């Protein structure tokens, strides 16, 4: 667990009369402990990962800091410690939220109706889709080239389910190997154990960016699933979720969202898709 102290002077989000009501659930616990606990995926750049100093960073982490600011101001805490808990597999991330180990999960989790049976989600934070990463020398240029190949995918993810459906629908002959983490899938790709590693395109892009030799990899340009991301929070905790949603909507209404996208995606030449641009606009909800 990594701990950081968030100074009150750093706050950016405005308090509204609706936010001045009595806290409940998650807010009660944060108020009592003066701690806000964020779960994150430690190997999912550029969304959430550890930098060279071991600190959690990334697009999702920055958005969760905005939410942390809003929570601190809502509760009127002079100081609030922000704890970061690394969580890898989807089952771990869901259990950590449900069991109260973390107050919010800020990584790369796809919003699904099945998951909403167990917990709630904030407003969407990103839209991406599943694709494949391979070594350039293997000649896999798009996802249709996965036929007859060995493929790694993280077990229990929405990507695994989409990949199995994609293989079945196209009647591909493929050797599917499940792994427990993104790093394990990439290691299998690098050592030749598999021909391709499949994950969400945003995550695969991050790994290429951080690679010693980005030119050694090829990312398929097409996707075979729809992956809308959101932050997981406990079910039926409307007071806390409203603060998170208000903070995100306020952020989406400001130029800061474009600066954030540029920092983690745009400066690497990754253009904002029309559907993502629309998502930012549709979720810039008014007060």
Image: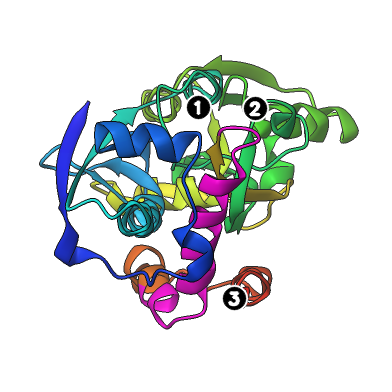
Q: Which mark is residue 97?
A: 1
Front position in the image: 170 or 274? 274
- How many angstroms separate mark 1 from mark 3 (CA)? 28 Å
- How many angstroms separate mark 3 from mark 2 (CA)? 51 Å
Q: Name which residue lies at 65% across and 35% down.
A: 236
Residue position for label 3: 287
- Contact, mark 3 vs mark 2 (Cβ under 8 Å): no
Left-right relation of 245 to 172: left
Q: Name which residue lies at 30% across and 53% down.
A: 72
Q: Residue 251 magenta-drawn?
A: yes
Classify mark 1: helix, strand or loop. Answer: helix
Q: Is residue 47 visible?
A: yes
Indicate the quadrant containing the C terminus: top left, top right, bottom left or bottom right: bottom right
Badge 2 or badge 1: first in the primary sequence: 1
**Which of pointers 2 and 1 indicates the residue nearer the eye?**
1
The image position of residue 215, as x and y in percent, is 35, 54
The image position of residue 243, as x and y in percent, is 49, 56
Chain part drawn in magenta = 234-259
Q: Quadrant of residue 49?
A: top left
Q: Name which residue lies at 51% across and 79% down.
A: 253
How many other residues sit within 10 Å of disc 1, few (<14), some (14-19) or many (≥20)? Answer: many
Q: Is residue 37 visible?
A: no
Give the vertical position of 65 relative to 278 (above or below): above
Residue position for label 2: 149
Badge 1 or badge 3: first in the primary sequence: 1
Q: Which mark is residue 26?
A: none
Indicate the quadrant containing the N terminus: top left, top right, bottom left or bottom right: top left
Give the vertical position of 195 relative to 260 (above or below): above
Badge 3 or badge 2: first in the primary sequence: 2
């Amino acid at each position: 667990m990594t701990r950081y102290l968030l100074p009150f002077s750093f706050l950016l989000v405005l308090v509204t009369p609706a936010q001045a009501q009595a806290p409940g659930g998650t807010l009660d616990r944060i108020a009592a402990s003066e701690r806000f606990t964020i779960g994150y995926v430690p190997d999912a750049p550029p969304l959430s990962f550890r930098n060279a100093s071991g600190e959690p960073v990334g697009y999702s982490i920055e958005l969760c800091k905005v939410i942390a600011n809003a929570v601190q101001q809502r509760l009127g805490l002079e100081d609030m410690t922000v704890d970061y808990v690394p969580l890898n597999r989807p089952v771990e991330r869901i259990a950590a939220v449900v069991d109260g180990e973390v107050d919010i999960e800020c990584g790369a989790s796809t919003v699904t109706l099945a998951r909403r049976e167990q917990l709630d989600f904030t407003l969407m934070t990103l839209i991406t889709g599943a694709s494949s990463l391979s070594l350039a020398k293997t000649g896999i240029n798009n996802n249709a080239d996965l036929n007859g190949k060995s493929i790694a995918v993280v077990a229990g993810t929405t990507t695994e389910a989409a990949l199995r459906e994609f293989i079945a629908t196209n009647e591909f002959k493929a050797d599917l190997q499940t792994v427990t983490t993104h790093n394990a899938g990439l290691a299998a790709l690098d050592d030749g154990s598999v021909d391709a590693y499949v994950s969400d395109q945003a995550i695969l892009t991050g790994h290429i960016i951080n690679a010693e030799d980005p030119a050694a990899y090829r990312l398929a340009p097409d996707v075979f699933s729809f992956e809308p991301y959101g932050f997981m929070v406990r079910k039926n905790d409307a007071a806390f979720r409203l603060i998170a949603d208000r903070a995100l909507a306020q952020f989406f209404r400001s130029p800061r969202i474009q600066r954030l996208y540029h920092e983690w995606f745009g400066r690497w030449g990754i253009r904002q898709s029309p559907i993502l641009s629309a998502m930012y606009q549709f979720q810039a909800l008014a007060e």
